[in-house]
Amino acid sequence: SHAGTPLSGDDGPSVVAHRGASGYAPENTLAAVDKAAEMGIRWVENDVQRTRDGELVVLHDDSLRRTTDVEEVFPDRSPWKVKDFTAAEIARLDAGSWFGSEYAGARVPTLEQYVDRVEHNHQKLLLELKNPQLYPGIEQQTLKVLANEGWLDRRHVAGRLVVQSFSADSVRTVHELKPAVKTGFLGTPRVSDLPEYAEFTDQINPSYGSLSMSYVSSVHAFTGPHGRPMEVLTWTVDDADTARRVAGYDVDGIITNRPDVVRDAVGED
Ligand code: G3P
Ligand code: CA
């Protein structure tokens, strides 16, 4: 899509690879970004957390346990919280073997490494601030990393970056710190609360289970902070029937672990 145009056009919702193409490669790794790129998927979603020594890394859980070999490498460090490990310690971990032996050696990327790869692949980034209440100041720090990497240049801000969170406070903070950056709120606010959300968020991004056609049209009726109708991206849709159903609600994007399945079902603008 062109800079400044809405996320979705007439050809169908944008397809967003959730944690990368995480149905096919280990979530939130560079391999999952590349897998999405190989499939021709332009948007990737990721989750950002912070290490003990203040580095931003890409991981979904607040613990390293599920998606790395941290239990083997650091057996005495239960419950293996990201915030209790240094970036150097995390860099030693294998974040791929749990998913499949062919991904042995995949690492937990730093945010810098991650956005470099997304840039290299000419992809677009839906960045989630995960558990921001655990990491005071993560909004400002994330924006600083993005700025250093060139992601707050006009061409990026216009059409290639959205920062989202389940925390409305965090989304509002991002908007106030850098009003040019598009934002998304993860959740399903009451329709009566949407005018307040429209002051600071461009997107309302609900779980598909809580979605209806009338809710999507209610969101579209409000103008977001950048002067366009607020958008709806829904998650996590991995089957063709559900993808077609939510596309029929006129959602602007579908966040999926299986971007090839969703793209084949609903097309993409
Ligand atoms: O992008 C939406 C989705 O990622 C939110 O849920 O738990 O997968 O981060 P979760
Ligand atoms: Ca997420």
Image: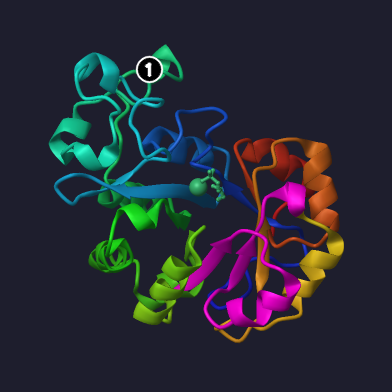
In the depicted view, which residue is nearer to us: 249 or 166?
A: 166
In the depicted view, which residue is nearer to us: 205 or 269?
A: 205
Question: Is 254 on the left or on the right of 70, as rendered?
Answer: right
Quadrant location of the N terminus in the rendered image: bottom right
Q: Is residue 33 above or below residue 218?
A: above
In the depicted view, which residue is nearer to us: 129 or 17?
A: 129
| Image x and y of residue 200, in percent | 52, 79
Is residue 5 among what the camera can see? yes
Mark 1, other Cα within 10 Å: few <14 / some 14–19 / many ≥20: some
Is residue 229 among what the camera can see? no
User: Disc 1 residue type?
Assistant: Ser
Q: Which color scheme did the rendering employ for the protein?
A: rainbow
Quadrant of the rendered image containing residue 253:
bottom right
| Image x and y of residue 91, in percent | 20, 33
Residue drawn at 75 percent across, 47 percent down:
209
Check residue 39 for magenta coloring. no
Q: Is residue 90 above or below residue 49?
A: above
Question: Is 28 on the left or on the right of 217, as rendered?
Answer: left
Q: Is residue 100 above or below residue 22?
A: above
Q: Which residues are magenta?
A: 181-210
Q: Which residue is mark 1?
A: 97
Quadrant location of the C terminus in the rendered image: bottom right
Residue drawn at 83 percent across, 47 percent down:
244
Q: Is residue 141 above or below residue 246?
A: below
Check residue 199 for magenta coloring. yes
Question: Is 133 on the left or on the right of 219, as rendered?
Answer: left
